Image (cartoon, helix red, strand yellow):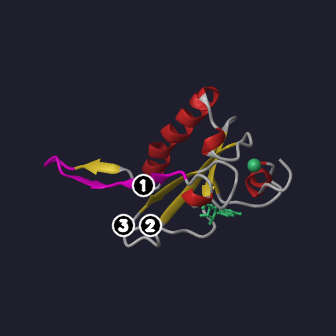
Amino acid sequence: MDNCIFCKIVAKQIPASVVYEDDDLLAFKDINPAAPVHLLVIPKQHVATLSDCTEEHTAMLGKMLALAPKLAAEHGINVKTGADGQRSGGFKTLINSGPDGGQEVYHLHLHVYGGARPWRGLGT
Ligand code: AMP
Ligand code: ZN
């Protein structure tokens, strides 16, 4: 897709700090992080917004979400369970959709946030 910044990242026309890549997905560090760890997971195929997704996108959406805990573990923000059963760590996943959903880049992306709080502008 012409003039899509995330398609340009997929095409390696502009640089990004890539943390994961396979045939279908790319993940990279957000350029303006709102948390100590802030990653974006995108499909390589251009899909503008979650509102454009239908049942045919189920596998791709599942792959995007399933990648989040793998990336979280690699970046030390996965949920940990201590010997006493207490959980610690953890992360937040978010997809902004459309103007009212706060979407600024119209190439579908899943935010993965984690690390020591406070985080910027996430109401947590
Ligand atoms: P959203 O508001 O959900 O559309 O979020 C778009 C996100 O993309 C923001 O968090 C931006 O900081 C991030 N972003 C924009 N351009 C780039 C880029 N070239 N590389 C990495 N992240 C970017
Ligand atoms: Zn795109």
User: Label 1 sits on what residue type?
Assistant: Lys
Q: Which residue is drawn at 70% across and 47% down?
A: 48
The vertical placement of 105 against 36, above or below, is above
Q: Are marks 1 and 2 in contact (CB under 8 Å)?
A: yes
Q: Do the residues labelled 3 and 1 touch (CB within 8 Å)?
A: yes
Between 82 and 60, the one nearer to me in the picture: 60
- For the view shown, which residue lies furthest in the right direction? 2
Packing grade of label 1 (10 A; few <14, some 14-19, many >=20) is some
Q: Which residue is drawn at 42% across and 55% down?
A: 92
Q: Residue at x 43, y 70 (%)?
A: 119
Relative image position of residue 41 (x, y in whole percent): 59, 48
Q: Do the residues labelled 3 and 2 touch (CB within 8 Å)?
A: yes
Relative image position of residue 99 (x, y in whole percent): 62, 59
Q: What stretch is highlighted in magenta?
A: 82-95
Q: Is mark 3 on a helix, strand or loop?
A: loop
> Where does label 1 land, which residue?
92
Query: How many circles with numbers are drawn on the protein?
Result: 3
Please give the label number shown on residue 124: 3
The vertical placement of 83 against 101, above or below, is above
Q: How far apart are marks 3 and 2 (CA)?
A: 6 Å
Specify which label sits upstream in the sequence, 3 or 1: 1
Q: In which quarter of the image is residue 59?
A: top right
> Where does label 2 land, which residue?
122
Of discs 1 and 2, which sits in the foreground? 2
